[in-house]
Image (cartoon, rainbow, N blue to C red):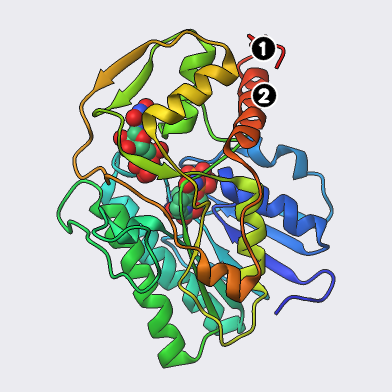
Amino acid sequence: MATLENGRILVTGGAGFIGSFLCDALLAKGYEILCVDNFYTGTRQNVEHLLDHPRFELMRHDVTFPLYVETDEIYSLACPASPIHYQRDPVQTTKTSVHGAINALGLAKRVKARILQASTSEVYGDPDIHPQSEDYWGHVNPVGPRACYDEGKRCAETLFFDYRRQHNLQIKVARIFNTYGPRMRPNDGRVISNFIVQALTGRPLTIYGDGSQTRSFCYVDDLIDGLIRLMNSPADFTGPCNLGNPTQFSMLELADIIIDLTGSKRIFERRPLPQNDPRRRQPDIALATAALGWKPITPLRTGLAKTIAYFESRLRIKPLTTA
Ligand code: NAD
Ligand code: UDP
């Protein structure tokens, strides 16, 4: 475990939304960071403020190819996360999860590093049980348009546990639920960035289906705290461990909160519900609370206000309200 100051940590997908905040937090704790990314959905801009940092290094690399570096810990985050992006090149998405996991695990085995996988609530698919706890095996369509992501992540989890059983690797598996915050791209395609950008630019908010489907949204700072706690948890705690905010909202409720916070007009554009779109999603975080002492502390409105401020400055829009 890299508890020593200047312990070396590899973050794959480090120029993405979550990865860039993870790099910030780990640098602040004194670690040396090697950030690896192929910029498929991430950007140099997300880590631009770190480029001159003496303990930060950015490397362009595709995780589907092996990587030979020295490291004490690996956070495996590389993978497009937004449905429109992971469905654009589904074969590459599966490769990124599966070949990426094999390469990261092979590296962890060689250098005896502890390794954490950014898995997802999507392993539960369109869940039959609610809220979802880690002992639920899920309800995933293996041949649907989301399968490249869902099954890729499920296979990566399998590989993590087999490397532990077969090679005694120190693994951690985080099942991350919908997370949001600054540094999401305006064209990311996920619901929070879509709604905020639409509200700030005076366009109708795109509601897929009837808007009654639910999600539970976690602010990125809370998630980063959970990921680092999980990495630093005792060796016999592997997870899988849910990390997410259990407060659940329908997409219509979310739209109304964003309209309220931005002071924009309440105009909706209805679009068809994407195929296999989960009807509901809410994490049971009892395990994370018991094992890691973790629970999210940022209410949705607080996190959204920070995210809206980010998009206002990114899009160079004057705030519509003074609130
Ligand atoms: P993101 O798209 O912003 O970040 C993913 C990063 O991985 C990007 O920088 C991208 O360029 C990089 N990447 C993709 N393919 C790669 C490859 N082959 N080689 C190297 N780099 C590659 O998404 P995010 O929201 O920051 O998600 C980060 C991780 O967390 C992902 O693994 C995602 O599956 C997981 N996750 C995120 C959420 C969420 O709500 N944000 C929920 C569940 C799981
Ligand atoms: N959604 C929506 N309008 C949008 C984008 C998404 O109504 O502009 C819905 C989508 O159908 C899903 C939910 O919002 O039910 C969350 O979608 P997102 O892509 O953010 O993440 P998911 O949890 O589906 O991976």
Residue beneath the point at 69% across and 53% down: 23
Residue 139, how many percent across, how many down? Answer: 22, 61
Q: Name the residue under label 2.
A: 309
Q: Which residue lies furthest to the left in this view?
A: 143
Instruction: Tell me the tag on residue 319.
Output: 1
- The part of the image, by quadrant, that contains residue 248 is top left
From the image, which quarter does the C terminus lie in? Answer: top right
The residue type indicated by label 1 comes to Pro
Evaluate whether residue 188 shows in this view: no
Q: Distance between the residues labelled 1 and 2?
A: 8 Å
Considering depth in this image, is 167 or 64 the residue closer to the camera? Answer: 167
The kind of secondary structure element at disc 1 is: loop
The residue type indicated by label 2 comes to Ala
> How crowded is the residue under tag 1: few (<14 C-alpha within 10 Å), some, or many (20+)?
some
**Direction from residue 153 to residue 24 in the image, left or right:** right
**Direction from residue 256 to residue 281 in the image, left or right:** left
Considering depth in this image, is 276 or 261 the residue closer to the camera? Answer: 261
- State whether residue 215 is above or below residue 72: above
Residue 32, how many percent across, how many down? Answer: 77, 63
- The part of the image, by quadrant, that contains residue 55 is bottom right
